[in-house]
Amino acid sequence: MEGGLVQHKIVGHVNTNSRVSKKKKVVRRRSLVLSSSSSSSSSPSNNNARELLGVSCDGRNDVPICLGLQRLYSVCKNVFKGVGFVPSSLDVNNLCNILDSLKPEDLGLSRELPFFKPGGHANKPPRVLCTTVYECPKMKFSLVLFFLPASAVIPLHNHPEMTVFSKLLLGTMHIKAYDWADSGDVHPEHHESPSSLRLARSKADSVFTAPCNTSVLYPTSGGNIHAFTAITPCVVLDVIGPPYSKTDGRDYGKLENLKDDDAWLQEIEVPEHANMDCIAYLGPRVIETDIS
């Protein structure tokens, strides 16, 4: 998922309006793990998703506007400036407060949906669903929902030059997170390997249950490398700034942990079971206008 791992209340080291200096790439980027990415509301993938999520409408004209979601859009539009940009402490607090005030119902979600009922995934492997609520035309930020069935996993992955806010809306989830220890810490036995092992420091290894505080990760801190495991069915809202971009060399990088705690990590091919199904968003609309 794309999401943060260190809860906002313990973050206090954000540099105001600072830009992270560009560093040499340390992992080769892979394609984002999405499939069935058609946005057509009539595609088989979206028909199955509508049944699972209890969506009955065929369009979005009858879906009300959520004031909290509009506030989130307005703030994001003014906060995110591009690749490597770290929002100020004031902006981080403001975004976290808005996200913390959001409820599942604000996005048309509830525990009564078929997705959360026992047997809702009978005879089906646990596969993550992903839907884009909104993506800035200038690629400065995106709002994305992730639906994880019980026992589903979003494997260890990184967020190159990105700041990500994650709000667990429903469910209980285990999160494991790391930050790179140092750009020079390369495993001596793999120094010449094109996908060298790198040392990473453990930042989080905890279970979170909604409702809980919004989490934030930064380009070089806050648990930029993380993995999610759903203990119960979960829904996570991510604010991603900026989104992944293969064109800009910031594609999704899948990593493998070779030990626990502080770990030597290396990039691997994305396994088939880690793929997500990207579905059309049919919830409350985002209107491209500022509100107070």
Image (spheres, rainbow, N blue to C red):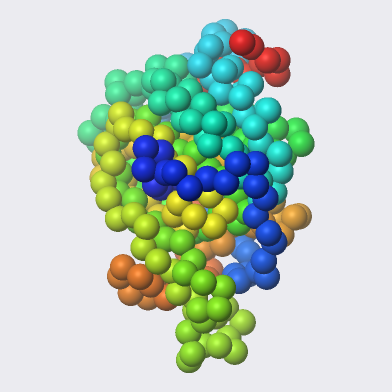
User: Image quadrant for the C terminus?
Assistant: top right
Q: How many marks?
A: 0
Residue 220 lies, with reference to residue 186, above or below; the image says above
Is 134 displayed left or right of 151 in the figure?
right
**Residue 20 image-quadrant placement:** bottom right
The reply to whether residue 178 is in sight is yes
Residue drawn 75% across the image and 55% down it: 248
* Identity of the residue furthest to the left in this view: 118
Q: Is residue 145 visible?
A: no
How far from the left and from the top, in percent, is residue 237? 47, 33
Residue closer to the observer: 120 or 160: 160
Q: Residue at x 45, y 17 (%)?
A: 106
Q: Decide: is 193 above or below 148.
A: below
Q: Is 230 or 46 nearer to us in this picture?
A: 230
Give the side of residue 183 with respect to residue 156, left or right.
right
Identified at 37% across, 50% down, the residue is 228
**Snapshot quadrant of residue 37:** top right
User: Residue 78: percent from the left, percent from the top?
Assistant: 68, 28
Image-based side of 182 in relation to 155, left or right: right
Indicate the position of residue 291 as horizontal and vertical percent values. Answer: 64, 11
Above or below, comparing residue 19 to residue 168 in the picture: below
Q: Residue at x 51, y 88 (%)?
A: 190
Q: Is residue 221 above or below residue 77?
A: below
